[in-house]
Amino acid sequence: MTVRIYNLGMRISDIGEFGLIERLSLIVNGDLIGDDCAVVEIQGSKLLLTTDALVEGVHFLKDSGPESIGWKAVSVNVSDIVAGGGRPMWILISLILPDIKVSFVERIYEGISSACKFYDCRVAGGNVSKGEALIIDVFALGKTSRPVGRGGAEPGDLLFVSGTLGDSRAGLELLKEDRKSYEPYELALIERHTRPTARIDYANHISKYAGASIDISDGLLLDAEHLAKRSGVRLEIDSSRLPISEELKRFCAERGKDPIEYALRGGEDYQLLFCHREKDMNPFLDMTVIGKVSEGTGVFVDGDRMGGGFSHF
Ligand SMILES: [Mg+2]
């Protein structure tokens, strides 16, 4: 029996989201914990399990469109399944609801339904409970022929990201300006925040070629840190290679901001960070080489050791 010492004065903000997860993993002997998905094998089938909740005020603003809330709740879970090298099959949904209009909840489910059609998975059930704030907690089950975790990066691999980075954070900042009208490029950024698309088009590529993979939910630097730590390698990022959209370039140019900063630390892009050998690059996917994997520890940008990105606490 292990004797656990409880520090009664300590709060979650003292140790952060990831410090808390480490402590809780110890309690349940969590050697299955630490990747985007848990992998379980049942009679020869490799299944991926993941869960992620959206909380009003933390992950979406109170007046977000209900359809986009539903879409996003499914997408963030599918994103983890894809990062694990799989495709989603079934999802369960727990709703925690204040006494709001039925039509609002139905519209959330319209968003859930269209996301499920897009990702080719099905809602298999769920649960409703009363609460103070609106929370949508999704559990997703997927399958894969070859699971991919965060721990398989090897020196000599190149480091890739899908799509463009930093758009979601710019979109959130625009939403918070709460203006009556927005320009088309601004609306494009807002859409990347409110209605992110999980990169289901990468499912085969990740499962076939990636040594390690993670979805970028907390910002490139922080997620790269997780991958580097679990793989026991150093990740070297070249900031001049970071893929930045035309919309984000314009957003930053008009406000005197640095798009590199958005790409490195912005959260909720739900793009993929993964690595493999150069020969396995796929020219038909929007993947960009942003650096390389080498021996050592930590994440380096242009040669400098970096700290993390976004944390909820
Ligand atoms: Mg993830």
Image (cartoon, rainbow, N blue to C red):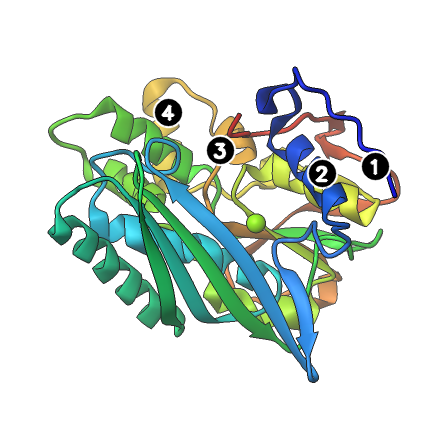
Identify the amino acid type marked 4: Ala
Q: Residue at x 41, y 50 (%)?
A: 137
Foreground mark, 3 or 2?
Answer: 2
Circle 1: element type: loop
Mark sitting on residue 297: 1
Which amino acid is tagged 2?
Glu
> Residue tagged by mark 4?
253
User: Which residue type carries mark 3?
Assistant: Gly
Name the side, left or right, on which 56 lies relative to 150: left
Q: Which residue is mark 3?
A: 266
- Answer with the quarter of the image where residue 253 lies: top left
Name the side, left or right, on which 63 lies relative to 31. Answer: left
Callout 1, which amino acid? Thr
Gap between marks 2 and 1, in whole Å? 19 Å
Residue drawn at x 73%, y 43% as measured from the top left: 27
Q: CA distance from mark 3 to mark 2?
A: 24 Å
User: Nearer the N terminus, badge 1 or badge 4?
Assistant: 4
Secondary structure of residue under mark 4: helix
